[in-house]
C-alpha cells in the first residue's frame, strides 16, 4: 500500500506525532514531501522541512494535527490564513470529536485517529473514525495507518473515548503492570534487575503467544494453571471477586471519563 500523493503537513511533532512520522519515513514516505510546523522549529527528522509558521503555499493534500488537545484553539489560529483546504485532515487530538474539529477546520475529509505508542516500532494500534463514505478517503487514511501496525475503523464515534482508554492509554497500563510484576518478584527476594528482566521477557513471550493463539487469553490462562498447582493459586487471587477485572474496569472508566471531559472542553 503506497502513501497518498501530495504534501503532508504536521502541526506539532511531539512524542506521538514524531513516532508516527518516523515510522512513515522508514516505510518509504519521501521526507521532501513533509513539512513540520512547531513553535520551536526543531525536532523534525532529517530531510523534513521544519518551520515555525505556516508557509505561504496552498493547502497540502494531508494536514495532520499532532498537538495536545488543549492546543486546538492555537492550531485554529495558526491555520486561519491557510490557502484552500486539505483533502484530508487527520487528527490525533485525544478527546476532540468530529464536531469540534469540523467547527474549527475545513477539509474534504476529516479523520480522527487514535494511535498508541508502539506505532514507533510498527506494532501499534490505531483506531480510525470518519463521517465520509468516500472509498478514496478511507483508502488514504488506511495507507497512513497500515505502516503503524494494527488498525480498526470505529463505527460509532460514541465509542471513541472507550477505544482511546483501552488501546490509546493501554500501553501505559501494561507498562505499569510490567513494573508491578517486577516489583512483586523483587518482594519475594529476587534481585531487582533480575526480576525486571524476567518480568519483561515473560510479558513479551506471553503477548506473542496470545496474539497467535486460536483461543482466548482466558482459555490460555486456564491451560497454564494445573489443578492444585502454583499458577492456579496465583490466579485464584486475581480471580477472587473478579478483582483484576474490576480494577481494570475502574482504570478504563477513569480514562474514558477524562476523554469525555476533554471533548466537552474542546466543544
Image (cartoon, rainbow, N blue to C red):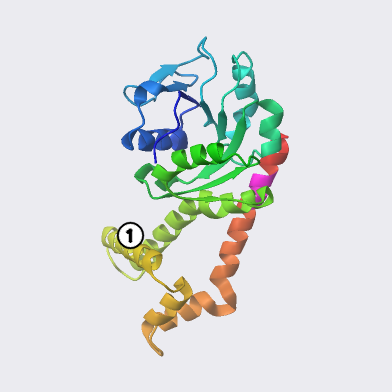
Q: Secondary structure at mark 1?
A: helix
The N terminus: image quadrant? top left
**Residue 23 appears at what percent x and percent y?**
36, 38
- Residue at 56% from the left image edge and 63% from the top image edge: 248
The C terminus: image quadrant? top right
- Residue at 44% from the left image edge and 36% from the top image edge: 15
| Visible residue check, residue 169 | no
Q: Single out the residue that lies furthest toward the bottom.
A: 228
Q: Is residue 257 magenta?
A: yes
Seen in the image, is 31 located left or right of residue 99? left
Q: Is residue 228 magenta?
A: no
The residue that disc 1 covers is 200
Q: Nearer the viewer, residue 143 or 74?
A: 143
- Residue at 39% from the left image edge and 37% from the top image edge: 2
**Residue 48 appears at what percent x and percent y?**
37, 22
Seen in the image, is 265 located left or right of residue 148? right
**Residue 130 placement: quadrant:** top right
**Residue 81 appears at what percent x and percent y?**
62, 13
Q: Residues within 10 Å of mark 1 (few under 14, many from 20)?
A: some
**Residue 70 placement: quadrant:** top right
| Visible residue check, residue 100 | yes
Q: Single out the residue that lies furthest toward the top.
A: 56
* Magenta-drawn stretch, dominant element (helix, strand or loop): helix
**Residue 50 appears at what percent x and percent y?**
41, 18
Seen in the image, is 127 located left or right of residue 20? right
Q: Nearer the viewer, residue 186 or 170?
A: 170
Magenta-highlighted residues: 256-260
Seen in the image, is 254 located left or right of residue 179? right
Count the marks: how many?
Answer: 1
Above or below for 220 versus 137: below
Above or below for 41 versus 252: above
Amino acid at each position: 500500500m503506497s502513501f497518498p500523493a501530495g504534501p503532508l503537513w504536521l502541526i506539532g511533532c511531539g512524542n506521538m506525532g514524531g513516532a508516527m512520522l518516523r515510522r512513515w519515513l522508514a516505510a518509504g514516505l519521501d521526507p521532501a514531501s513533509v513539512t513540520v510546523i512547531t513553535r520551536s522549529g526543531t525536532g523534525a527528522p532529517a530531510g523534513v522541512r521544519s518551520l515555525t509558521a505556516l508557509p505561504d503555499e496552498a493547502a497540502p493534500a494531508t494536514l495532520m494535527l499532532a498537538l495536545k488537545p488543549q492546543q486546538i484553539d492555537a492550531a485554529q489560529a495558526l491555520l486561519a490564513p491557510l490557502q484552500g483546504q486539505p483533502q484530508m485532515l487527520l487528527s490525533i487530538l485525544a478527546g476532540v470529536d468530529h464536531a469540534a474539529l469540523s467547527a474549527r477546520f475545513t477539509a474534504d475529509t476529516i479523520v480522527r485517529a487514535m494511535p498508541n505508542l508502539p506505532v514507533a516500532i510498527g506494532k501499534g494500534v490505531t483506531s480510525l473514525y470518519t463521517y465520509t463514505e468516500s472509498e478514496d478517503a478511507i483508502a488514504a487514511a488506511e495507507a497512513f495507518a497500515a505502516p503503524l501496525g494494527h488498525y480498526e475503523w470505529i463505527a460509532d464515534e460514541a465509542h471513541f473515548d472507550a477505544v482511546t482508554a483501552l488501546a490509546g492509554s493501554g500501553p501505559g497500563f501494561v507498562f505499569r503492570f510490567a513494573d508491578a510484576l517486577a516489583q512483586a518478584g523483587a518482594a519475594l527476594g529476587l534481585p531487582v534487575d533480575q526480576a525486571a528482566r524476567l518480568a519483561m521477557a515473560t510479558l513479551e513471550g506471553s503477548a506473542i503467544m496470545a496474539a497467535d493463539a486460536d483461543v482466548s487469553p482466558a482459555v490460555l490462562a486456564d491451560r497454564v494453571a494445573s489443578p492444585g498447582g502454583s499458577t492456579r493459586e496465583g490466579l485464584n487471587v486475581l480471580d477472587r471477586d473478579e478483582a483484576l477485572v474490576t480494577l481494570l474496569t475502574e482504570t478504563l472508566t477513569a480514562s474514558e471519563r477524562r476523554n469525555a471531559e476533554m471533548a466537552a472542553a474542546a466543544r
